[in-house]
Amino acid sequence: MKEDQLLDAYRQIWNNRELASGPHPADTLKEAIKRDLLDEGTHPRVRKPLEEKHRISAARIAAASIGAVEKELLLEEYTRMLKALKQE
């Protein structure tokens, strides 16, 4: 699957989020997932832990009306980013 198709799937699930549109859809998607897991759209006092945000996002992806391949690939990206953030 192309990176821009995966970014479109992300936009279908989180359609109210503004995403910076750069020349590389993969970078845009990774940055959006990172911001989501770090709960950057939420006030610092009420932010959720990484694992909880991952679980919430996984549930939202599973319930979304996108294809099974898109769901699997988005979940993989979320899991990769979770592991990377835990190592920081």
Image (tube, rainbow, N blue to C red):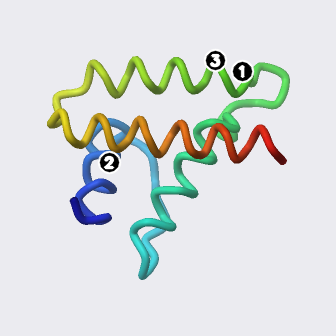
Q: Is residue 16 above or below residue 42?
A: below
Which residue type carries mark 2?
Arg
* Residue shown at 30% from the left, 22% from the top: 62
Q: Is residue 4 above or below residue 6?
A: below
Q: Nearer the viewer, residue 83 or 52?
A: 83
- The residue depicted at 67 percent of the width and 40 percent of the height is 83
Q: Is residue 3 left or right of residue 40?
A: left
Secondary structure type for disc 2: helix
Left or right of residue 59: residue 82: right
Residue occupying image coordinates x 53% and y 56%: 30
Q: Which residue is mark 3?
A: 52
Identify the mark nearer the N-term, 2 or 1: 2
Q: Secondary structure at mark 3?
A: helix
The spot of residue 48 in percent (x, y) is: 71, 21
Of the two numbered discs 2 and 3 in the rendering, the one whose residue sits closer to the viewer: 3
Give left or right: position of 83 versus 57: right
